[in-house]
Image: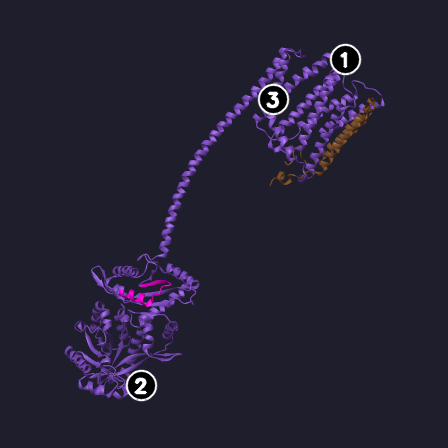
Amino acid sequence: LIALSALVFALGDITWAILELGLRQQPFPSVADFFYLVNYPLLLGGVLLLPEKTATRGEQIKKVLDAGIVMVAALLGFWNFLLGPLVASNTDYPLIEQLILLAYPVGDLVLLWALLRILYTRSDQQYENDVPAFLLAISLAVTIVADCTYTYQAFVGTYVSGGLLDIAWRAGILLTGLAGISQLSTLQSLKNATRFSNRLASLVKSIRALTPYFPYFWLIAAYVILMRSSTYPMYMDFLSLSLAVGGIIGLVLLRQMITLSENNKLNIELQQTMGNLKGQTSELERTNQELQNEIMERKTVERQLTYDSLHDAMTGLPNRVLFLDRLGQAIEYSKRRTEYTFVVLFIDVDHFKVINDSLGHLTGDQLLIAAGTRMRECLRSSDTVARLGGDEFAILLEITGEKISPSTIVEKLQEGIRLPFSLDGHELHITVSIGVVVSVADYAHPEEVLRDADIAMYQAKAHGKARFETFDIKMRSYAFSRLEMEQDLRAALENGEFQLYYQPIVSMKSNQLFGFEALIRWVHPSRGFLLPGEFLPIAEESGLILPIEKWVLNEACAQLKKWHEKYPSLQNVSVNVNVSNKQFSQPNFVDGVIRALQVNGLKAEALKLEITENVLISNYSAANKVFSKLRDFGIQFEIDDFGSGYSALAYLQHFPISAIKIDKSFIDEIGKSPRGIELIRAILSMSRELGMEAIAEGIETSEQLNELMGLSCNLGQGFLLSRPLDKEAAERILEEQE
Amino acid sequence: LSMRAITRNQPSKLFYLAALSAVFLLIVDFGVGLLLTNAQQQLIYSDLISPFVDFLATAALFFAAKQSFRFQGNLGSPGD
């Protein structure tokens, strides 16, 4: 429509040019006037169709009121300064001419309406850079001013065609065209859309900021006209002027009331929002406080969990995890600082199981707690004492530039531990075996250090306990060898690599066979023939001793049964089987022995169980039951290695012992010390008095044999009489005996 | 980023060319008006130049209107 308005305006100019230049006429009214007047509604239509932001009802009303105020005020001005004079001066013209003449100022009011429309609909931030609308508004303003000037000049007779006023009209139409091109560039490429320069943008912003005050400017202008009417005659009478100004004031008041109402509404909404926000804030504060409390609780729990995960629950000492962590740090630190060394002690309480079993687990636990405390007291606060589990402790000693001997510290520790512990009315004395590792650069992981300290500790145990051993590389190979041996032992049971050898027990006087002691041998696939001392300690530690001893018992019984069947006259020949502490303490030990006899159909007298004094002492309370059951069944017990253990002797009174086997150490003294012979004599005398047989072990020389015979020792066993024999060789002896 | 932010400070060459031409035309118009002292000559000049200027503006507006229809947009809504 705006383009169409420009076109009809151009047609008007062409028509006028034809009339003026071609026909040399200046008719009024003419066809050109028609085109010029049609231009106004088309332009207004185009502006009214411009898009605008969706406004609230209140905003729409205010905009209409603003436009109304301006229009009423403009009408007031137009009437008094343009329309009024025109009407008054042209009363002689025909009505049509008067109407056409008045139509131009009215058209300007239409343009003013269009201008106001642009100003009010484009006052939002959204149209900050709306160059096309801005150019169109300028174009309208220029045209309105030019039209008003023309009307005034025409009225006073000063207008000259082709003058500056014509340039103003052309400027107006050019600005409209530029608005079109601006819009065109926007449509063609948004990237290249026309923008205001910063200064112009600032100017446009300032003009926009004035928009809400326009009605007040026009109100003032209307009031000025009203005041002027008092001194100068106006074309509108005072009453009409007053009514018009009053109307404007009424519109302004209405606008203010709407604004006030909107403000009140906004204020209420604001209060509500503030109230909601306050409620939400307090809710958030409460939630925040709850969260803080929860976080604190979680942190406390987390700290406790972390502490629990790194400390031993019973003693409160660092556990294996924390110890390994500190040891790892020590390893790293020792690599960086040459003056820094560390020592790791692996500590195991000797005979702890005995204490635990005899005094109960509660006392055992109290002892461990006290031992841990004692260790801490013996060391510096910078040293780490940890409980690894069971009766095992580990200590990390960190030494920086100090000349401290690890052995001094270890001895101090052992001395401290040796002092008695008073627990539940008991005064307990304990010792510890300690494995020591001094830091060397080879270690990369803390587990390796602990492993070597453990190996050294086992060496200390193996060497008699209550001592310490410092780790050296040979120990590791020994430990690996032990591990290998343990694995081989398991395989040996499955592969039948064990054999029983039988050492005769004979009457030294008559050389008559009394029985055999069954002795185990291991035919190792790679190591060859192994004696018990080479593998039984490992079997005992690994728990494999139980199946091995079970096998020995069954195999010995089975073999004796075969011999009894083959040599019926030798039914009194018995077999001695050694029983370890571990086997003796098993709850099913008695059943196992009885089953072995029953399965093989042997009489109870055919089997004699050899136990050491230590076994009796360690299982003193349980031994009564075992002896009671087996004695009822008829099985006899012999004390092996008599005199080498505790020799408490009281057990000889309480337990049904059928024989004692005098330890080889006494036999070895024969010919060396007269006291040795006297001791043997005393043992033999005691056995006779108690009604027990006495068997001399380890007879290796004729001198020993003669001395023993001289002491009336009837039974003997040893290399001189016979080495341990395999079953075939033993059988030959049986044949000879038969 | 909005379209407005993307296109900020990138003026249309077409628009500035047209604006410069319009300013040049008005300067020439004003200059000729000053040069022509005769009222008749001024009248003739004004009657000839006015339709010319009108048609320039009309052509620009019609072209913009055509593009507006093409883009299904509305006049005066840049960036929407």
Q: Name the residue under label 3.
A: A215
The residue furthest left is A689
Q: What's the distance in space between the residues labelled 1 and 2, CA to CA?
A: 166 Å
Which chain is represented by brown in the image? B
- Residue A53 image point, x, y percent: 61, 31
- Residue A155 image point, x, y percent: 74, 16
Tell me the mark number nearer the camera, choosing from 1 and 3. 3
The C terminus of chain A - image quarter: bottom left
- Residue A717 image point, x, y percent: 25, 83
Q: Name the residue under label 2.
A: A729
Whether residue A543 is visible here, answered yes or no, is no
Which circle's residue, 1 or 3, is located before the other in the chain?
Answer: 1
Which circle's residue, 3 or 2, is located before the other in the chain?
Answer: 3
Q: What residue type is labelled 3?
A: Pro
Q: Is mark 2 on a helix, strand or loop?
A: helix
Which residue is painted at 36% across and 52% down in the image?
Answer: A304
Q: What residue type is labelled 2?
A: Ala
Q: Which amino acid does label 1 sit on?
A: Pro
Q: Name the residue under label 1.
A: A94
